[in-house]
Amino acid sequence: MSKMTPREMAATIGGGLLSFPVTPFKPDYSFDEATYRANMDWLCGYDVAGLFAAGGTGEFFSLTPAEVPHVVKIAVEETKGRVPVLAGTGYGTAIAREIAIGAEKAGADGLLLLPPYLTHAEQDGLAAHVEAVCSSVKIGVIVYNRDNAILQPDTLARLCERCPNLVGYKDGIGDIELMTRVYTRLGDRLTYIGGLPTAETFALPYLDMGVTTYSSAVFNFVPEFATQFYAAVRRRDHQTIHAGLKDFILPLIAIRNRKKGYAVSIIKAGMKVIGRDSGPVRPPLTDLTAQEIAELTALVAKLPQTATRQAAE
């Protein structure tokens, strides 16, 4: 059971960089616990405000409902309270509640509620889905606004009245008007998280809309770069931000955009590049080609601090 209240968790994650550690798999696609423990311990050595176990980059969509709480339990054990651990949950309402309860028992400090599986729904149905998950646990819940789960400001406001533990809103669609309307309506009632793929590209404009944090996938394999980039965003250092986008983020996006699903696959490939091989992605995702890994290797090698850190380890 978490020792943090929902509001404490939300305040903590809102004050720094967030990330979604990959879920390592062995060649037969089974969970690689030893590598996961090592990765979590390593990442806790950096300035990170929260880690999402079994999240999107952690291939939540390929894990079974039983695997998620197990992954969360290992994350809680290995982080040892150094950073909040939040768990992914989702699919249909019944499964989402089941995973949420299991994650809370495993020690998660909060939940990220991903969109329901496959189907589209009206606002009343989405609200009922969110409320059902919130009411099943005492820990804080963050809704992930994306794809087929776009909550409107009025819906969010009603949910905030009914669900005290609904404490976060993660934007994954990049609708600036909607983000502005949500923030204007709810203000500091929620903690706002940037959740677009390669969130670094949107970090600065989102900061001006009240989004003080974002989830960095690249933190998995270039944590020095990720934390320095986040610090530059918070101090509005345009020169450093633009250099980071030009020299690393945009070239990485160019590789990522070649195939569907590469937003996750390229992070797993990055782990391999730095010598922390975390295995393949599970189907239906596909891994990068050897040529693409070579391109990624060359890109990472241009980051001198990453190269220095690797050489020292």
Image (cartoon, rainbow, N blue to C red):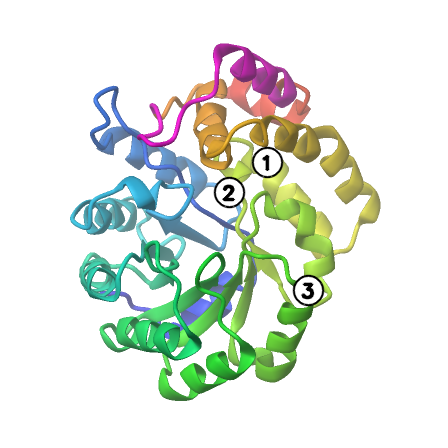
Residue 111 visible here? yes
x then y, percent, for residue 188: 57, 79
Vertically, is 66 above or below 22? below
User: What residue is shown at x 29% (from left), y 46% (from top)?
Assistant: 75
Q: CA distance from mark 3 to mark 2?
A: 31 Å
Residue that appears at 70% across and 56% down:
234
Amino acid identity at mark 1 = Glu
Indicate which label's residue lies in the foreground, 3 or 2. Answer: 3
Question: Which image quarter: residue 61?
Answer: top left
User: For numbered disc 2, what is the local secondary structure?
Assistant: loop
Count neighbours of disc 3 (C-alpha within 10 A) and say few if under 14, some if 14 to 19, many if 20 or more.
few
Query: Are circles 1 and 3 on residues that touch, CB within 8 Å?
Result: no
Cβ atoms under marks 3 and 2 closer than 8 Å:
no
Residue 5 visible? The answer is: no
Quadrant of the drawing holding the N terminus: bottom left
| Residue 175: image location, x then y, percent | 64, 62
Residue closest to the eye, 10 or 304:
10
The residue carrying mark 1 is 224
Is 81 positioned to the left or the right of 309 in the image? left
Q: Position of residue 16 (x, y in %)?
A: 56, 57
Give the extent of the magenta segment.
Answer: 279-300
Q: Amino acid at mark 2?
A: Tyr
- Name above or below for residue 167 compared with residue 106: below
Q: Which residue is mark 2?
A: 46
- Amino acid type at mark 3: Ile
Residue at the disc numbered 3: 176
| Gap in angstroms between the C-alphas marked 2 and 1 | 8 Å
